[in-house]
Image (cartoon, rainbow, N blue to C red):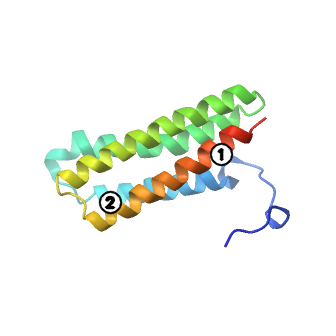
C-alpha cells in the first residue's frame, strides 16, 4: 500500500524517486537473470538488455540533475521511456529464444509496463 503524499519523506536526490528505485531494481533483476544466458549471447542479447535496462535508471538520474530546466528533465524521462520500450522488446526476444520462462517474462513485462506508466505520469505533471 502506498503512503499518502504527506507521509512520504521529501525527495532530495534521484535515489529518492520511486521510478528510479524501481528501474534500478528491475535492471539488477535483468543483470542476474542474464548471467545465466548462453555464452554465445554475451555480446548480443545479454549486452543489449543490460544496457537498455540500465539506461532507464541512468536517464532518470541524469534528468534529475537537470530538473531546474523542466524541459530537460522531461526530455530525459522520454529517453528513459524509450529505453524501457527497448528493454521490453529484448524481453520478447529472450522469451521467444527460450532463455526466459513465460512466468518470468510475464512478471517482468508487467513490471516494466507499470514503471512506464509511472514515468509517463511524472512527465505529465512535472512543471
Do labels 2 and 1 touch, CB within 8 Å?
A: no
48 w.r.t. 17: above or below: above
Cα distance in 3D space between marks 2 and 1: 24 Å
Q: Residues within 10 Å of mark 2 (few under 14, many from 20)?
A: some
Lateral position of residue 12 relative to residue 121, left or right: right
Counting from the top left corner in percent of width and height, residue 32 is at 35, 60
Towards the viewer: 124 or 93:
124
Q: Is residue 71 left or right of residue 4?
A: left
Is residue 6 rendered to the left or right of residue 123?
A: right
In which quadrant of the rendered image does the C terminus lie?
A: top right
Secondary element type, mark 1: helix
Residue at image position (25%, 43%) is: 45
Residue positioned most to the bottom: 1
Q: From the top left corner, tell me how far across and down residue 12 is, in percent.
A: 77, 50
In the depicted structure, whether residue 58 falls above or below residue 5: above
Q: Position of residue 78 (x, y in %)?
A: 56, 33
Residue under the point 19% across and 52% down: 96
Q: How many discs appear?
A: 2
Query: Which residue is depicted at the point 33% across and 43% down?
Result: 89
Q: Residue at x 61, y 52 (%)?
A: 19
Outermost residue, right direction?
6
Quarter assignment of residue 103: bottom left
Quarter holding residue 73:
top right
Q: Secondary structure at mark 2?
A: helix
Q: Nearer the viewer, residue 16 or 86?
A: 86
- Disc with the residue nearer the chain's start (2 vs 1): 2
Which residue carries the number 1 mark?
A: 121
Horizontal and vertical percent position of residue 125: 74, 41
Query: What crowding class fits label 1: few (fewer than 14 Cα within 10 Å), some (14-19), or many (20 or more)?
Result: few
- Residue picked out by circle 2: 105
Amino acid at each position: 500500500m502506498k503512503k499518502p503524499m504527506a507521509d512520504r519523506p521529501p525527495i532530495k536526490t534521484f535515489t529518492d524517486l520511486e521510478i528510479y528505485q524501481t528501474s534500478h531494481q528491475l535492471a539488477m533483476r535483468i543483470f542476474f537473470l542474464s548471467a545465466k544466458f548462453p555464452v554465445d549471447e554475451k555480446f548480443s542479447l545479454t549486452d543489449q538488455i543490460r544496457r537498455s535496462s540500465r539506461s532507464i535508471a541512468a536517464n532518470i538520474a541524469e534528468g534529475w540533475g537537470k530538473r531546474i530546466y523542466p524541459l530537460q528533465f522531461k526530455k530525459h524521462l522520454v529517453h528513459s521511456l524509450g529505453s524501457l520500450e527497448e528493454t521490453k522488446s529484448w524481453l520478447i526476444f529472450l522469451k521467444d529464444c527460450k532463455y526466459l520462462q513465460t512466468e518470468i517474462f510475464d512478471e517482468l513485462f508487467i513490471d516494466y509496463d507499470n514503471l512506464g506508466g509511472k514515468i509517463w505520469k511524472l512527465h505529465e505533471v512535472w512543471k
